[in-house]
């Protein structure tokens, strides 16, 4: 299973954009990049996923490097409800997800 | 459209007892996944099932743990003769038949072993 590397924690001011980085230098050509987040006492929540092109949805944007060895999750305006642990995951063929320890995002009012 | 439902939300067992955790996937989903999360850690994959079949159980402990997803009814994760180290949050996720689609997670069962 390909591994990802994320900072342990990040802080952001409320209503500011947040850029959450993820390195995945051993990604294979068929691995999709998925982002999930987990609020305390809840299950993970899907945020966004992509393969090669940048992706946008109502929650966030995903910027994927040209060589695919890194990606960045962008929250355009952080709110207090965005405080969570964010997981960057590579999905290997066969549908298994392998979670790391993620980035704990603190949003400062 | 109900999400993934897990029950019970909290389960307390004494050492040596059996624990049964249930998961009803989202409507229309035929793929179920179980994960375990220890405090302050990320989720660890345990097992992947489709209806009546175990597809990948590479993350399951070799003894005392089993999982099933029958043709009718919820998926069950069973832990026999529980020990203190089994205390954790157990999450279930489901997805539809298409590859690389998101998994939708339940809110987990928190298992405590006395």
Image (cartoon, coloured by chain):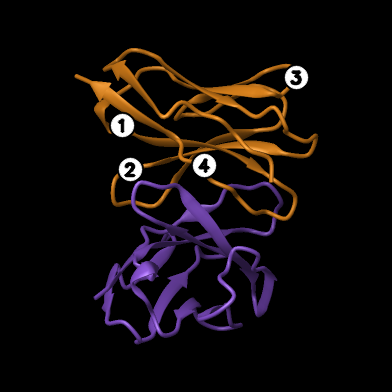
Q: Are marks 2 and 4 on the same chain?
A: yes
Numbered mark located on residue A100 in the image: 4
Residue A4 drawn at (x, y percent): 60, 34
* Chain letter belonging to callout 1: A
Question: Chain B appears what colour?
Answer: purple
Residue A29 drawn at (x, y percent): 80, 34
**Any idea which chain is the orange one in this picture?**
A
Quadrant of the drawing holding the C terminus of chain B: bottom left
Q: Residues within 10 Å of mark 3 (few under 14, many from 20)?
A: few
Q: Secondary structure at mark 2?
A: loop
State left or right for residue B81 relative to residue B10: right
CA–CA distance in space, label 3 to label 1:
30 Å
Q: Are marks 3 and 2 in contact (CB under 8 Å)?
A: no
Residue B39 drawn at (x, y percent): 34, 52
CA–CA distance in space, label 1 to label 4:
18 Å
* Chain letter belonging to callout 4: A
Q: Give whichever of discs 2 and 1 has the lower sequence position.
A: 2
Closer to the eye: label 1 or 4: 4
Q: Are marks 2 and 1 in contact (CB under 8 Å)?
A: yes
Closer to the eye: label 3 or 4: 4
Q: Are marks 3 and 2 on the same chain?
A: yes
Q: Give whichever of discs 3 and 1 has the lower sequence position.
A: 3
Name the residue: 62% across, 58% down: B96
Residue B48 drawn at (x, y percent): 62, 65
Name the residue: 50% across, 81% down: B64
State left or right for residue B88 relative to residue A19: left
* Chain letter belonging to callout 2: A
Q: Which residue is mark 3?
A: A67
CA–CA distance in space, label 3 to label 4:
22 Å
CA–CA distance in space, label 2 to label 4:
16 Å
Q: Which residue is mark 2?
A: A39
From the viewer's side, name the closer residue of A109 and A106: A106
């Amino acid at each position: 299973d390909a591994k990802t590397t994320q900072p342990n924690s990040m802080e952001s001011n409320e209503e500011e954009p947040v850029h959450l980085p993820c390195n995945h230098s051993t990604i294979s050509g068929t691995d999709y990049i998925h982002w999930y987040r987990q609020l305390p006492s809840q299950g993970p929540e899907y945020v966004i996923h992509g393969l090669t092109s940048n992706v946008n949805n109502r929650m966030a944007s995903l910027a994927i490097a040209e060589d695919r060895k890194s990606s960045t999750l962008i929250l355009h305006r952080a709110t207090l409800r965005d405080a969570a642990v964010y997981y960057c995951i590579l999905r290997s063929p066969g549908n298994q997800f392998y979670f790391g320890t993620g980035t704990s995002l603190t949003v400062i009012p | 459209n109900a999400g993934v439902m897990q029950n019970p939300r909290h389960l307390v067992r004494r050492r040596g007892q059996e624990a049964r955790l249930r998961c009803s996937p989202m409507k229309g989903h035929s793929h179920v996944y179980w994960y375990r999360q220890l405090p302050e850690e990320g989720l660890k994959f345990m097992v992947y099932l489709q209806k009546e079949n175990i597809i990948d159980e590479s993350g399951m402990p070799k003894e005392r743990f089993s999982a099933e997803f029958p043709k009718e009814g919820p998926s069950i994760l069973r832990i026999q003769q529980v020990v203190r180290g089994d205390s954790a949050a157990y999450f279930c996720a489901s997805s539809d038949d298409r590859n690389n689609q998101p998994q939708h997670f339940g809110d987990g069962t928190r298992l405590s072993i006395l």
